[in-house]
Image (spheres, rainbow, N blue to C red):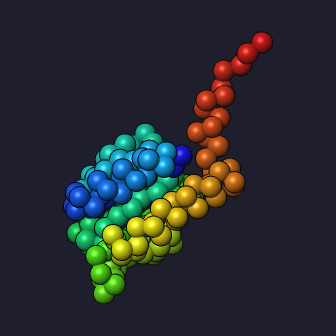
């Protein structure tokens, strides 16, 4: 189960994506702006941030997103012509740029692949270890 934050102002699109991801067993939170995403849950950073290109442009060049180590950013827009400028640290963290809702199935496949890869590489071990901390004699 990956922790995912959906950022953007298209409520209908994000609600549909959120329902799909929750149905697949992921933990999903919502934010309308990048600044709101930074404040959403300071104790537990998400592994994946799915952010609209408009929200990134509104945040400006100083945009930062709280992600776990090894986390990824998926940027979505509404047309193929929209290409936001990203600071280098966000470029490195970007897993994909999608046109939603057209590439909805690709998004689901990316999230599944990211989640299984993080489990394989051990990046999600902190979640699994926390459940096994109690010792039984």
List the single residue furthest toward the bottom: 81
Q: Work out whether residue 127 can be spotted.
A: yes
Residue 3 in view, yes or no: no
Task: Left or right? Give the position of 14 relative to 92.
Answer: left
Please tell me which residue is depicted at 36% across the width and 57% down the height of the picture. 17
- Depth order, front residue of 6/87: 6
Image position of 116 (left or right of 36): right
Whole-percent x, y for residue 30 in the image:
31, 50
**Residue 33: percent from left, percent from top:** 25, 58
**Mark count:** 0
Which one is in front, 102 or 30? 102
Quadrant location of the C terminus?
Answer: top right
Residue 95 % position (x, y)? 50, 70
Q: Position of residue 74 (x, y in %)?
A: 43, 67
| Residue that extends furthest to the top in the rendered view of this protein | 137
The residue that appears at 30% across and 87% down in the rendered structure is: 81
Residue at left offset 63%, top offset 37% = 128
């Amino acid at each position: 189960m990956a922790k995912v934050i959906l950022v953007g102002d298209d409520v209908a699109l994000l609600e549909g994506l959120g329902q799909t991801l929750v149905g697949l067993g992921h933990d999903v939170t919502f934010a309308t702006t990048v600044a709101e995403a930074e404040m959403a849950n300071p104790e537990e950073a998400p592994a994946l941030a799915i952010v609209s290109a408009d929200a990134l442009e509104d945040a400006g060049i100083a945009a930062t997103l709280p992600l776990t180590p090894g986390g990824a950013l998926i940027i979505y827009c509404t047309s193929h012509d929209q290409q936001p400028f990203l600071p280098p640290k966000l470029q490195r963290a970007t897993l994909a740029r999608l046109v939603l809702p057209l590439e909805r199935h690709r998004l689901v496949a990316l999230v599944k692949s990211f989640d299984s890869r993080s489990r394989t590489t051990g990046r999600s071990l902190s979640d699994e270890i926390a459940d096994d901390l109690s010792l039984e004699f």
